Image: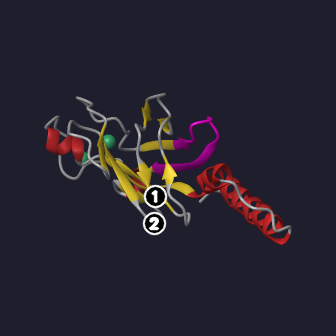
Amino acid sequence: MSRSVRTLIATALLTGGLLTSAALPASAHDEQRRPHRWVEIDQVQYNAPGEDRRSNHSLNSEYFTIRNNSRHGVQLRDYTVTDRDGHTYTFNRLRLRSGQTVTVHTGFGQDWRLHRYQDSRRHLYDNNRGQLTLRNERGWRLDQCSWNRFDRGHIGC
Ligand SMILES: [Ca+2]
Ligand SMILES: [Ca+2]
């Protein structure tokens, strides 16, 4: 977790505390907005195990995961994950429950709840060095995860 995200969380906790102490009723809108700050990049398998072939199996063995660490469900529609080359994945409608993780695979597949597919014909993430950035539907940066070749193909963020 980046320092900026920690700061956001600290700010959010403080704000939540102030709201609670003031006994202000939280609207449904607030409940939806606040938890966005606890959604983060959990893991990146940037190098598919074995030789990189363009088989769908190899492509789908390259993936990243997004986790909802908040206590509330979060709607991920229009959340984006961008890499350094400017490639962007945009989430369709998906409500991620508290504690749930969604896996986004590089290759082809039928989207179902916690597995999504980018339908790419090539591997997307550099095996030596790269970075993913998660933004919410408003474009606010929620998390960032970087790797290099010493991470051996997989990184927990
Ligand atoms: Ca790769
Ligand atoms: Ca590989």
Task: Tell which of 63 and 148 is nearer to you.
Answer: 63
Q: Which residues are magenta?
A: 133-147
| Residue under the point 44% across and 34% down | 90
Q: Left or right? Give the position of 70 relative to 93.
A: right
What percent of the width, then of the height, locates residue 77? 47, 39
Task: Tell which of 94 and 105 is nearer to you.
Answer: 94
Q: Quadrant of the N terminus?
A: bottom right
Percent position of residue 13, x then y: 73, 66
Label 2, residues with CA under 10 Å away: few <14, some 14-19, many ≥20: few
Q: Which residue is mark 2?
A: 99
Residue at the disc numbered 1: 67
Asked if residue 146 lies in the magenta stretch, the reply is yes
Label 1 Cα crowd, 10 Å radius (few <14 / some 14-19 / many 20+): some
Q: For the point 20% across and 39% down, which residue is it?
A: 109
Q: Please state if 1 lies on the left or on the right of 46 as rendered.
A: right
Q: Amino acid at mark 2?
A: Gly
**Does mark 2 have its CB less than 8 Å from ligand 1?**
no
* Residue 122, x across and y down, in percent: 25, 31
The three-letter amino acid code for the residue at tag 1 is Arg
Q: Using the numbered discs, state the Cα–Cα distance from disc 2 to disc 1 in whole angstroms.
A: 7 Å
Residue 98 position within the rendered picture, expressed as x and y whole percent measured from the top left? 48, 64
The reply to whether dot 2 and dot 1 touch (C-beta < 8 Å) is yes
- Depicted 140 relative to depicted 68: above or below: above
Q: Quadrant of residue 88?
A: top left
SS type, badge 1 = strand
* Point 35% across, 43% down: residue: 127
